[in-house]
């Protein structure tokens, strides 16, 4: 069971179940790509201030679960707001920066893009919705995406176990 750190800011208490490093595997696909499997490591951390730092990396895996190449990285900050609201800033090395807004309800979080900014060389990306939840002690998450001429639809999901 996860124990609260005595230096955890009050604003982070509803998000305490996220804090730590998680790893596991997931599946993905989109009308513009073939289906794939991936491995992932995600870290949510805090330094005593009332926000979480966030870092994620994924890699493509084969049917046996062996890594066969990098996929994506993203990093940012999760900023709790009053009334269980949440703001998330996220940056990607592909030239995309996102601002998400949403809320926490127990061990479930739903966020959706409020702002998407892209460099001139990034792929078209217009919107995203992410769901996170604690299920049987594991972090489950799903991401729906709108981009490259497609409407909002399922893109990736994963089940991660706490490793730190």
Image (spheres, rainbow, N blue to C red):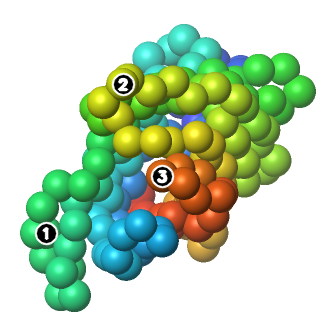
Q: Which residue is mark 1?
A: 67
Vertically, is 63 above or below 59? Answer: below
Could you say where residue 125 lies in the image, as x and y percent from the top left? 50, 42
Query: What label sits on residue 148 in the rendered view?
Result: 3
Query: Which residue is found at the position 82% from the left and 32% from the top?
Result: 84
Image marks 1 and 2: residues in contact by CB distance under 8 Å: no
Indicate the quadrant where residue 56 lies: top left
Query: Which residue is found at the position 54% from the left and 54% from the top?
Result: 149
Q: Which residue is mark 2?
A: 120
Give the CA separation, mark 1 to mark 2.
Answer: 31 Å
Task: Give the quarter of the figure containing the N terminus.
Answer: bottom right
Query: What label sits on residue 38 in the rendered view?
Result: none
Query: Which residue is found at the position 66% from the left and 57% from the top?
Result: 152
Upstream in sequence: badge 3 or badge 2: 2
Could you say where residue 133 lies in the image, as x and y percent from the top left? 65, 59
Residue 3 in sight in this render: no
- Front residue (pair 163, 75): 75
Closer to the eye: label 1 or 2: 2
Vertically, is 106 above or below 136? Answer: above
């Amino acid at each position: 069971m996860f124990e609260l750190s005595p230096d955890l800011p009050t604003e982070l208490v509803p998000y305490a179940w996220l804090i730590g490093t998680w790893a596991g595997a997931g599946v993905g696909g989109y009308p513009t790509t073939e289906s794939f499997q991936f491995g992932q490591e995600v870290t949510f951390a805090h330094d005593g201030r009332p926000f979480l730092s966030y870092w994620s990396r994924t890699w493509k895996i084969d049917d046996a679960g062996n890594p066969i190449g990098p996929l994506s990285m993203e990093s940012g900050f999760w900023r709790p707001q009053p009334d269980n609201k949440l703001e998330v800033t996220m940056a990607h090395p592909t030239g995309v920066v996102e601002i998400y807004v949403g809320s926490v309800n127990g061990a479930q979080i739903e966020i959706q893009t409020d702002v998407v900014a892209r460099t001139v060389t990034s792929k078209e990306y217009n919107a995203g919705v992410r769901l996170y939840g604690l299920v049987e002690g594991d972090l489950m998450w799903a991401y729906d995406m709108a981009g490259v001429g497609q409407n909002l639809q399922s893109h990736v999901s994963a089940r991660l176990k706490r490793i730190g």
